Image (cartoon, grey):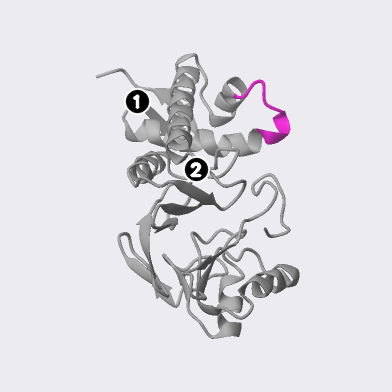
Amino acid sequence: MARNPGPYTGPGTNTWVLDDGSGAVTVIDPGPVDTAHARAIMEVVAARRLQSVLVTHTHSDHAPMANPLASEVGVPAVGYAPGPSFEPDIRLLDGARFAVGSLRLEVLHTPGHSGDHLCFRAGDVLFTGDHVIGGSTVMVEDMGAYLRSLRKVQGVGARKMLPGHGDEIDDPRSMIDWYLAHRLRRHQEVLEAIRSGCETVSEVVGKVYAEVDSSLHPLAARSVAAHVGLLAEEGRIAWDDDRLVLLPSP
């Protein structure tokens, strides 16, 4: 785990080293540039054959060390697309198969938390990055895409999920069911807040998150904005110059 605890990262970013059983390995999400963490990764890799460095997405707590680490060892950095502090040598698309020694990882494009987010399936284990994390929900940029991506991984049938933050998840189906129920419930709460007269994201946050510490309201505003965007896509509200307007039901 990287030494980068915070409100977005929880205790820190999980870096996973996947071994095919014969010593061929890939590193998933090496995290931010940090000498001590890079040393810890290489101590785990040790005499194994590092073949690649993968990133689930290009956020600053997951991807910046991928290129330096890959370059130092002489292996490719791999991801969906370029992003801040990340330039993939190999780009992966949804449904691709990526080899780690004798293992074949299945690539799932899972936008929502970010547009470039990937999950990696190795047999019945799913590396979920920030799509699903241990012990908490995640920030979402595109709520419609995120809900579709949750349903996508729900159908994968994973036995275990290894997330980018928090503990391993031993009951993926229950966790995804909970994620979906939470998001759909929050979606309805945001709509009801607008129906009650809230006209801005800030007003919705104040009503929906009234019992949450106000220091966390800026984080909550990002989730509310994602729900508002989906409500606009659904034709239930209009969002004009930051003003929310409830539309008549068809």
Give the farthest residue toward the front: 22
Q: Is residue 247 above or below residue 151?
A: above
| Quarter where residue 201 is shown | top right
The answer to whether any part of residue 239 appears in the image is: yes
Q: Determine the residue positioned at 62% across, 63% down.
A: 31
Q: Nearer the viewer, mark 1 or mark 2?
A: 2
Q: Is residue 174 above or below residue 50?
A: above
Please give the residue where the numbered disc 1 appears in the rendered image: 236
Q: Earlier in the sequence, mark 1 or mark 2?
A: 2
User: Looking at the picture, how far across and down is residue 56, in whole percent?
Assistant: 49, 59
Q: Nearer the viewer, residue 114 or 235?
A: 114
The magenta region covers 209-216
Q: Label 1 to label 2, Cα distance in Å?
A: 20 Å
Please give the residue where the numbered disc 2 appears in the rendered image: 140
Give the farthest residue toward the left: 250
Residue 124: say if magenta: no
Say which amino acid is labelled 2: Val
Say which amino acid is labelled 1: Arg
